[in-house]
Amino acid sequence: MQQILDGILEAIEDEMKAQKHYQMLAENAADPKVKKFFEQLKKDEEDHEQALRTRYEAFMKLQAADQRENI
């Protein structure tokens, strides 16, 4: 179970790095269409991050339940 949790945390970090990257690209874009494109990619990454956080919380609850059963 810990391997899953660690993997999700790593994926969350990757999503956050991608968000910063796309934000920087959007800020540096001269063309409004390019700016909008990178802003949408950043939004997509924010959605991915939230989905991963939701899964992380679900696995944490599952792990806690498993630990209570093993006591």
Image (spheres, helix red, strand yellow):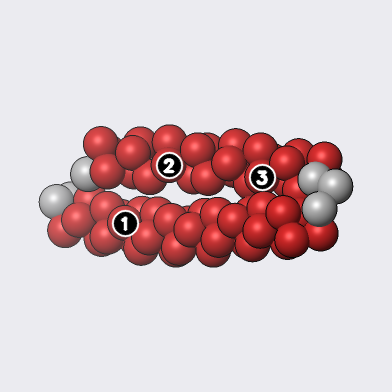
**Do we see residue 46 in this rendering?**
no
- Quadrant location of residue 65? bottom left
Crowd class of label 3 (few under 14; some 14 to 19; many from 20; radius 10 Å): many
Q: Nearer the viewer, mark 3 or mark 2?
A: 3
Q: Nearer the viewer, mark 1 or mark 3?
A: 3
Q: 54 or 27: nearer the eye?
A: 27
Q: Which mark is residue 59?
A: 1
* Amino acid on which disc 3 is placed: Tyr
Residue 70: x percent and y percent? 14, 51
Residue 58: x percent and y percent? 36, 63
Residue at x 25%, y 36% (from the top left corner): 3
* Amino acid on which disc 1 is placed: Phe
Q: Measure the C-alpha gap from mark 3 to mark 2.
A: 16 Å
Earlier in the chain: of badge 3 and badge 2, it is 2
* Amino acid on which disc 2 is placed: Ala
- Quadrant location of residue 25? top right
The residue that label 3 is drawn on is: 22
The residue that label 2 is drawn on is: 11
